[in-house]
Image (cartoon, rainbow, N blue to C red):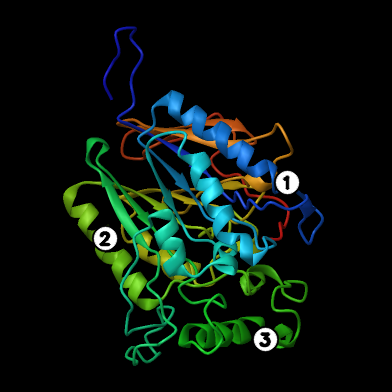
Amino acid sequence: GGVASDGVESPLLSFGLISDIQYADIPDGASYSGTPRFYRHAVESVSRAAESWKQADVAFAVHLGDIVDGFCPRNQSITAVTTVADALSIFKGMTYHAVGNHCLYNLERDTLAKLLGTPQQPRERKTGPGDPQQPRERKKDRYDQGCLYYHFDQEEASMRFIVLDCYDISLTWPQASGRHQQAKRILSEGRGEARLGNVNSPAELEGLSRRFVGFNGAVGTVQLEWLDTRLAEAKERGLRVILISHNPLHPSASPSVCLLWNYEQVLATIHKYSDTVVLCLAGHAHSGGFCEDERGIYHRVMEATVECAPGVDAYATVQVFDNRLHFQGTGKVESKTLYFKDKTAGVAEEPASVSATGVPRT
């Protein structure tokens, strides 16, 4: 970055960060584990975040998914989304959204893409969670809508942002669709003897198998190939990459119950480019979390806005410098500096690996 007249280094880029807003115009409630949720207050917190980003003159904002809550009455879903979008528009930049499970409980991808201005992939002929043993060609599924994964570049900071659709293969698709049927097969295999129980309950599952619940999903074969291509391009162009997803991608940053079903395949792909990928951002695990993985990539899971009591917030302004990222946290989000490993090793202000605690119901 440059140096201002007062001698303070200025960032190459600043952007806003928030997750799991889950707004709904309904009385306060709680998660299945009893954690309070403040549905109406969520949009007030968003307004404060947007005002803060306006003052900080951020270039854009990132929302890590679940803009509206699953308990929102379906005849209010569009109104709820536009209410949050209006609050975000307090600052004049673009907000880039990752799609979350609660988004898809409310609205189809085509509608979400139009409401949020999210880039959408064309309908595809291939499916599968990256398993080479699975048939790769199929007829177009009449229930299929284009997935919401995309990327955008910030040349002034030599950064590429890649946004994944973690519900590419999931139960959020219509029951007769190929993607829904494939999700059922993945869950049946992953859950084993627990497959006959409540598909949203991890109670009978242990360890990493707890991720095989109905509110998670998988990244399909086509998306995995797309990710590899986008990462290869970034490496060739000398761009650093920040990966954005709703579901966490590393078990040291999140309770198992919130992990992507095929997180290992996604990690294997990004680890091929560990000199390019610097950070993975995720939501979904409402208590938040952080780790530096075995290849030196940082994983930051953001705390949920919906679980902020009135007057409490959970958002950040992220500043990108030549050799580091700085999270200026507000409320539940701690401030932290992450140094790029090719410049300076280490994490400022706290240990390099802090596992999330608790098992939030998402």
User: What is the x, y in percent for residue 278?
Assistant: 37, 46
- Residue 283 lies, in percent from the top left, at 56, 53
Above-or-below relation of 225 to 84: below
Count of picture labels: 3
Q: Residue furthest top?
A: 6
Q: Toward the viewer: 335 or 64? A: 64
Q: Quadrant of residue 157?
A: top left
| Location of the C terminus (image quadrant) | bottom right
| Residue marked by disc 1 | 38
Q: Amino acid at mark 1?
A: Phe
Where residue 33 sits in the image (x, y, percent)?
Answer: 80, 59
C-alpha distance separating marks 1 and 3: 35 Å
Q: Secondary structure at mark 1?
A: loop
**Of the image marks 1 and 2, the number of the one nearer the N terminus:** 1
Residue at point 72%, 58% (across, down): 359
**Circle 3 crowding by C-alpha within 10 Å: few under 14, some 14–19, many from 20:** few
Cβ–Cβ under 8 Å for marks 2 and 3: no
What crowding class fits label 2: few (fewer than 14 Cα within 10 Å), some (14-19), or many (20 or more)? some
Is 143 situated left or right of 248 in this image? left
Q: Please, what is the three-letter code of the amino acid marked with disc 3? A: Gly
Determine the residue positioned at 70% across, 49% down: 39
Alpha carbons under labels 2 and 3: distance apart: 35 Å
Residue where numbered disc 3 is placed? 192
Instruction: Give the label on residue 186, or none.
Output: none
Q: At 49% from the left edge and 70% from the top edge, which residue is drawn?
A: 108
**Which label's residue is closer to the chain start, 1 or 3?**
1
Q: Which of 349 and 216 lies nearest the eye of the viewer?
A: 216
Is 289 above or below relative to 312? below
Can residue 24 be seen by looking at this rendering? yes
Is label 1 or label 3 in front? 1
Labelled disc at residue 230: 2
